[in-house]
Image: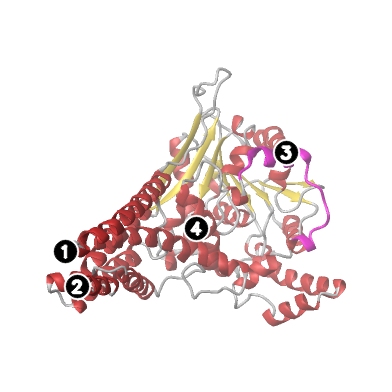
């Protein structure tokens, strides 16, 4: 009889029924509690953070709430099967509650291309990591607390319990370490004097600024706060580049207060993306002007300078066109004129390349996409992968290559200290989601028609090896635009980022030409 009792207890435990038998709780009640708790938290997360955790605080909330759901589920069901039910209920609730969210990281899953896989890993994958591990731990805690061994099976159950407690302890330590990594703050290195101390009168800080009611990040660096202000507008849309200007433009920050800005939806400002329907071209221009006014007031400057790169050149020109009274000059590097016409010419250039190289697969792929604007947003990413085939061969300056190697900032500069752990993920997510939302809104822009005159001085850094689909339009617009001062500087060994690739020459141009011609205190 005693042997029969032990066998039944073991069978009941494997089926997750032992706790229910002891307490008298119906099996369906535990499952109902599990589904309700998981779905409630899933809806709350989807409503407050439709793209998943985008800040350190949101990440900790997902981890702690998932731990609580797991604890409730494990205790209610007295079985590890609670994990699968809780996870399914949570994920279903999240996906249903955020159906209106737009962007590759939250849209239908696409695993047929590299960018689709990247979007899945950075979106649902990162969210899943912060969700799954704490939920596993919570279920383990719940099951261990709910099951109370007794009778002849107590000693055997106790041995298994010791092993489980050890596993729980290890997982707990791992999650504590992950939480510590998430909460580690970002920073930008101080500007030091010869003795290694912070230089008096300098500024080196990261600022979260409320722009249109949303937190957006600025990096501000300068050897002297009394110098003129230069606001850098990065490319994209959705690209974050805070560490790169800090590395390459250190000498420039001796002449200017250099400000990098993570525009709404990019990098450190990724959490500001939603509601996505309010992210329009007009709103980005208004944000630029709002940031400009903050810098003017803080540094007591009547006007500031705008330095745009790629998409940033579009934003800079449009902001200066709307409010010329705010800017000393606009400087473009990788100047864009018409995104739609550039894409059309790239389409033709790729078909021509495919014919010359005998690449029938490329030709069939492009013909299947058809002329831009593309219905499939991943087509733009596919075309980007062939840029190197269309650039004129060139060798960037050795100083640029050495700086890049020494800085060791990793892909898209994510290893820079300016990003915390979650923001490193956001650097990639921001480029995917924000570009997908904002880029289609740029299709009607063509400076050849829309900006025949600019009321501020215009300076263009021109890379001779730039894609013809971009460069030819920039040269055409530059020839026809009317501006108080306009100058173009051509760099032979440069393509789409001449101000960076020739950072030393660019600094000299800013110091010796642009500043004397345009700055009046």
The circle on residue 284 is: 4
Tag 2's secondary structure? Answer: helix
Q: Earlier in the sequence, mark 4 or mark 3?
A: 4
Image quarter (top left, top right, bottom left or bottom right) of the C terminus: top right
Local packing at callout 3 (Cα closer than 10 Å; few below 14, some 14-19, many 20+) is few
**According to the image, label 1 marks what residue?**
151
Which of the two marks, 4 or 1, is nearer to us in this view? 1
Q: Is residue 205 visible?
A: yes
Across and down, in percent, residue 339 comes to 65, 65
Q: Vertical placement of 33 versus 239: above or below?
A: below
* Quadrant of the snapshot with the N terminus: bottom left
Snapshot quadrant of residue 446:
bottom right
Q: Which residue is mark 3?
A: 402
Residues shaded magenta: 388-409
Left or right of residue 271: residue 155: left
Q: CA distance from mark 2 to mark 4?
A: 71 Å
Gap between marks 4 and 3, in whole Å? Answer: 35 Å
Dot placed on the residue nearer the N-terminal end, 1 or 2? 2
On whether residue 395 falls in the magenta region, the answer is yes
Name the spot of residue 289 as percent of width and height, x first.
Answer: 48, 50
């Amino acid at each position: 009889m005693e042997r029969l009792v032990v066998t039944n207890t073991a069978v009941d435990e494997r089926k997750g029924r032992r706790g229910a038998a002891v307490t008298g709780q119906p099996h369906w009640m535990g499952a109902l509690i599990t589904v309700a708790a998981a779905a409630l938290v899933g809806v709350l997360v989807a409503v407050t953070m439709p793209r998943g955790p985008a800040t350190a605080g949101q990440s900790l909330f997902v981890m702690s709430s998932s731990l609580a759901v797991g604890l409730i589920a494990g205790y209610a069901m007295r079985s590890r099967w609670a994990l699968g039910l809780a996870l399914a209920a949570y994920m279903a609730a999240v996906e249903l509650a955020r159906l209106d969210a737009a962007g590759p990281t939250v849209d239908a899953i696409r695993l047929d291309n590299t960018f689709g896989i990247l979007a899945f890993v950075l979106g649902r994958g990162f969210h899943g990591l912060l969700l799954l591990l704490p939920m596993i731990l919570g279920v383990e805690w719940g099951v261990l607390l709910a099951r109370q061994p007794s009778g002849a099976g107590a000693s055997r159950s106790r041995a298994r319990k010791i092993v489980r407690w050890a596993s729980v302890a290890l997982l707990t330590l791992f999650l504590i370490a992950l939480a510590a990594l998430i909460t580690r703050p970002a920073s930008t290195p101080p500007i030091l004097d010869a003795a290694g101390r912070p230089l008096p009168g300098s500024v080196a800080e990261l600022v979260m600024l409320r722009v249109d009611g949303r937190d957006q990040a600025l990096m501000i660096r300068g050897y002297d706060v009394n110098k003129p202000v230069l606001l850098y507008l990065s490319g994209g849309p959705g690209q974050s580049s805070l560490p790169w200007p800090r590395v390459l433009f250190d000498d420039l920050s001796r002449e200017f207060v250099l400000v990098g800005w993570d525009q709404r939806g990019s990098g450190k400002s990724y959490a500001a993306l939603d509601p996505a329907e309010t992210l329009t071209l007009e709103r980005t221009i208004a944000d630029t002007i709002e940031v400009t006014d903050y810098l003017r007031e803080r540094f007591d400057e009547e006007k500031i300078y705008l330095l745009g790169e790629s998409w940033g050149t579009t934003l800079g020109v449009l902001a200066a066109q709307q409010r010329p009274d705010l800017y000393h000059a606009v400087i473009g590097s990788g100047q864009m004129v018409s995104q739609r016409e550039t894409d059309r010419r790239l389409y033709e250039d790729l078909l021509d390349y495919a014919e010359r190289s005998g690449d029938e697969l490329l030709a069939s792929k492009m013909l299947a996409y058809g002329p831009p604007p593309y219905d499939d947003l991943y087509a733009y990413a596919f075309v980007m992968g062939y840029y190197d085939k269309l650039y004129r061969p060139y060798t960037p300056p050795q100083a640029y290559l050495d700086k890049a190697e020494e800085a060791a900032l990793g892909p898209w500069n994510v290893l820079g200290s300016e990003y915390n752990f979650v923001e490193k993920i956001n650097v990639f997510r921001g480029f995917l989601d924000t570009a997908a939302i904002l880029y289609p809104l740029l299709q009607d822009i063509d400076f050849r028609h829309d900006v025949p005159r600019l009321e501020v001085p215009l300076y263009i850094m021109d890379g001779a090896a730039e894609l013809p689909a971009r460069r030819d339009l920039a040269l055409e617009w530059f020839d026809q635009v009317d501006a108080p001062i306009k100058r173009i500087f051509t760099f032979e060994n440069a393509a789409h980022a001449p101000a960076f690739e020739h950072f030393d020459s660019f600094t000299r141009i800013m110091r010796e030409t642009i500043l004397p011609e345009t700055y009046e205190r």
